[in-house]
């Protein structure tokens, strides 16, 4: 008769991170699509304590380990950089290790072009079309100025414009776009899809 209430009491007192809970993590190492490979380890720490029922269950600074689940470098003409991270374990200062798999909710990146695709759980680099067009326009303008100086005519300016634009286009075609970079100290907000028991 007393056995069932004890089990219920233990189940009720077991601490867990509930489904839907948000946890802020801080990158402990830097990672970039330029050098990362799928399967590489990613290290983070909790940026805030995890509090359950008014009690700190995971203090700030608890270790979190994950892996690179997807990596794609930025292309020279098409294809933007993408980075996917799968979080796997959290280690408390006591040495207890818990398995978990939250998904990314948001990131605080210094690069405003980086965006989080929540459906794919990947960080993607924004478009470089505007920067590419500006680079071509600047080189075309420089070419026009130099052509006009050399030939002292509109014809020289026209030739210079064409040559500058060609150089600008070649530069764009030979240069890769920006990579996704998560530098040390960048914070990520993650959400738990399933509850995680901590005891």
Image: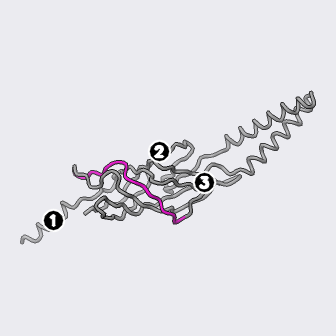
Q: Residue 2's x, y, as percent?
A: 7, 70
What's the distance in space between the residues labelled 1 and 3, CA to CA? 50 Å
Name the quarter where the C terminus is drawn: bottom left
Q: Position of residue 25 (x, y in %)?
A: 40, 51
* Quadrant position of residue 91: bottom left
Q: Which residues make up the magenta segment?
A: 38-53
**Residue situated in front as seen by the camera: 181 or 105:** 181
Whichever of labels 2 and 3 marks the residue nearer the N terminus, that label is 3
Q: Which mark is residue 81?
A: 3
For marks 1 and 2, give the one nearer the viewer.
Answer: 2
Would you name the residue on which mark 2 appears?
108
Q: Residue 165 colored magenta?
A: no
Q: Residue at x 36, y 51 (%)?
A: 23
What secondary structure is marked by label 3?
loop
- Magenta span includes 39: yes
Whether 96 is drawn above or below 140: the answer is below
Cα–Cα gap, marks 2 and 3: 18 Å
Which secondary structure, mark 1?
Answer: helix
The residue that label 1 is drawn on is 8
Check the picture and name the quadrant holding the N terminus.
bottom left
Determine whether 42 is above or below 158 in the image.
below
In this picture, residue 53 sits left or right of residue 23: left
Locate residue 65: give its quadrant: bottom left
CA distance for labels 1 and 2:
41 Å
Are there few (<14), some (14-19), or many (20+) residues within 10 Å of tag 1? few
């Amino acid at each position: 008769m007393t056995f069932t209430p004890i089990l219920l009491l233990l189940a009720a007192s077991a601490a867990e991170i509930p489904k839907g809970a948000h946890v802020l993590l801080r990158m402990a190492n830097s990672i970039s699509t330029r050098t990362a490979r799928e399967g590489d380890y990613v290290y983070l720490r909790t940026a805030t304590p995890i509090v359950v029922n008014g009690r700190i269950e995971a203090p700030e600074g608890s270790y979190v380990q994950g892996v690179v689940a997807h990596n794609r470098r930025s292309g020279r003409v098409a294809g933007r950089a993408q980075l996917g991270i799968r979080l796997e374990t959290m280690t408390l200062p006591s040495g207890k290790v818990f398995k978990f798999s939250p998904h990314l909710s948001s990131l605080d990146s210094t690069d405003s072009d980086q965006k989080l695709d929540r459906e794919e759980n990947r960080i993607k680099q924004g478009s470089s079309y505007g920067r590419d067009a500006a680079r071509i326009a600047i080189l075309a303008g420089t070419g026009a100025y130099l052509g006009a100086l050399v030939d002292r005519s509109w014809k020289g300016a026209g030739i210079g414009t064409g040559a500058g634009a060609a150089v600008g286009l070649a530069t764009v075609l030979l240069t890769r776009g920006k990579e996704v970079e998560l530098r040390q100290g960048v914070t990520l907000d993650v959400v738990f899809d399933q509850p995680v028991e901590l005891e």
